[in-house]
Image (cartoon, rainbow, N blue to C red):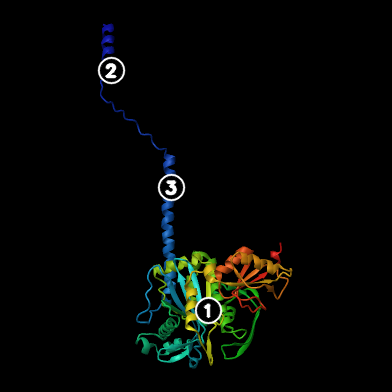
């Protein structure tokens, strides 16, 4: 009985194990991810999401803080048809330094400084062009007169020229922009004005700026607010200046000329940009409230500073610009030599002005700058300047005959960018491992664009 049961049971089990030809699906059990590994990735994702949210909040707060600080500084453009600014193109901003004395309204208001600033967002480039205040132009309703009269005329006749709701500052900026446009044959997209007090307060809000004074400056008749004069002096070399000192440096002109003053004003603007850039985007944004307070009542602009695209474009330029690469141009006897003087007015040759404007707008490089260079021997080593001049000429530079520098104990070579040729100056500085300074060497009256003063570091 047991044998028959075991046999029958064995046969049934064999039939069940036999292959029938049908596909047999075998389901495997899922291997569970270890709880520890899953929790690590979840924590990483949470951290990344939280970091992204915090970054968005930080950017929004910075933008809100900056927009709130600069919103009161923007005003409408009083011109009925200001030039359009197509996306992706550079913009031209007329910067007006205003000389106004609230305690002495009888003195009137006039523009002491006119600088056109070209901002190239795509190329991350900035160029400055100074216009002498004694330049003779045609001003609407007045006729031939100094160009700085335009702002004062627009200021006093704002409602007559541009409508009943126009403020004096808007009228002054509008007529100054119109006049500069016609003189330069260049569209002025926006304007900005600042008075002397605001200029000094901005520099103080930054904690001062560093200025490399190229030569000794002595002015025995610097004007004071009470209509007197005082003697001021600046020694050559890098130095830290507060707002009051930097303002004096930018305004003094009796030591040389109005053209030298224009050069110093551009130098101070570069120093301000350098100071802002050194703080980085977040540091500069955090300064917005202090700068807004410094500019309150002393600055106005038609630039839509709180507009996101304008803010991002200017931030893009500011974070990538090298202050030493800022183009510095001016209408002066060395750039437009065929001028005429009519009393105290200066009448410039229109074609030479157009040539200066073309250089101002062009992307600078060594070929287009066509700079003339002179090498001076400041090391006291016979034949050094002649040897270096030959090497530079072989490298493709235009070099005039070498000479001796006023000093023969110079330790480090310096490239002096006299007329604003930044690409050539940077190239020379890289080749000679030298420093760059704007202006002329002390004791030298150059007739070239760039002067190289060789130091003992060039002795091989």
Residue displayed at 53% across by 74% down:
328
Disc 2 to disc 3, how far (Cα)? 52 Å
Mark 2: give few (<14), some (14-19) or many (20+) Cα within 10 Å: few
Residue displayed at 58% across by 69% down:
425
Disc 1 to disc 2, how far (Cα)? 102 Å
Disc with the residue nearer the chain's start (1 vs 3): 3
Asked if residue 44 shows in the view, the reply is: yes
On the rendered structure, is 184 left or right of 229?
A: left
Disc with the residue nearer the chain's start (1 vs 2): 2
Q: Position of residue 170 (x, y in %)?
A: 41, 83
Q: Secondary structure at mark 1?
A: strand
User: Which of the labelled discs sits on residue 51, or is there none?
Assistant: none
Disc 1 to disc 3, how far (Cα)? 60 Å
Q: Which residue is mark 1?
A: 330
Mark 3: give few (<14), some (14-19) or many (20+) Cα within 10 Å: few
Q: Position of residue 189 (x, y in %)?
A: 41, 76
Q: Position of residue 358 (x, y in %)?
A: 47, 75
Q: Which residue is mark 2?
A: 18
Q: Quadrant of the N terminus?
A: top left
Disc with the residue nearer the chain's start (2 vs 3): 2
Which quarter of the picture shows residue 31? top left
């Amino acid at each position: 009985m047991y044998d028959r049961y075991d046999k029958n049971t064995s046969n049934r089990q064999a039939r069940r194990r036999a292959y029938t030809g049908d596909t047999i699906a075998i389901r495997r059990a899922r291997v569970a991810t270890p709880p520890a590994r899953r929790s690590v990735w979840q924590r990483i994702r949470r951290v990344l999401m939280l970091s992204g949210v915090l970054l968005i909040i930080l950017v929004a707060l910075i933008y809100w803080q900056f927009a709130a600080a600069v919103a009161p500084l923007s005003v409408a453009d009083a011109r009925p048809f200001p030039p359009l600014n197509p996306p992706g193109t550079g913009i031209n901003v007329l910067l007006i330094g205003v000389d106004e004395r609230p305690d002495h309204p009888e003195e009137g208001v006039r523009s002491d400084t006119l600088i056109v600033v070209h901002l190239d967002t795509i190329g991350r480039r900035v160029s400055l062009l100074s216009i002498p205040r004694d330049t003779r132009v045609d001003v609407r309703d007045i006729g031939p007169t100094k160009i700085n009269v335009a702002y004062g005329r627009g200021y006093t006749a704002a409602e007559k020229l541009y409508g009943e709701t126009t403020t004096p500052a808007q009228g002054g900026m509008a007529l100054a922009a119109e006049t500069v446009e016609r003189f330069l044959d260049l569209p002025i997209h926006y304007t900005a004005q600042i008075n002397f007090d605001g200029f000094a307060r901005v520099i103080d809000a930054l904690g001062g700026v560093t200025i490399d004074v190229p030569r000794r400056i002595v002015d025995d008749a610097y004007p004071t607010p009470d209509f007197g004069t005082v003697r001021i002096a600046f020694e050559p070399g890098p130095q830290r200046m507060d707002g009051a000192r930097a303002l004096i440096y930018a305004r003094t002109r009796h030591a040389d000329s109005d053209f030298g003053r224009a050069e110093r004003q551009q130098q101070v603007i570069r120093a301000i940009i350098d100071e802002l850039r050194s703080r980085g985007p977040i540091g500069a944004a955090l300064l917005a409230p202090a700068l807004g307070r410094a500019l309150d009542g002393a600055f106005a602009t038609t630039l839509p500073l709180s507009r996101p695209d304008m803010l991002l474009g200017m931030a893009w330029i500011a974070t990538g610009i090298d202050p030493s690469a800022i183009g510095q141009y001016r209408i002066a006897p060395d750039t437009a030599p065929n001028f005429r003087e009519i009393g105290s007015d200066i009448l410039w040759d229109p074609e030479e002005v157009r040539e200066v404007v073309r250089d101002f707008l062009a992307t600078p490089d060594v070929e287009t700058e066509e700079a003339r260079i002179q090498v001076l021997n400041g090391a006291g080593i016979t034949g050094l300047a002649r040897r270096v001049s030959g090497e530079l000429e072989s490298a493709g530079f235009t070099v005039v005959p070498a000479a001796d520098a006023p000093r023969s104990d110079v330790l480090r070579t310096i490239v002096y960018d006299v007329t604003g040729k930044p690409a050539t100056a940077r190239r020379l500085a890289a080749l000679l491992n030298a420093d760059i300074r704007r202006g002329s060497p002390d004791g030298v009256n150059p007739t070239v664009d760039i002067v190289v003063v060789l130091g003992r570091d060039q002795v091989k």
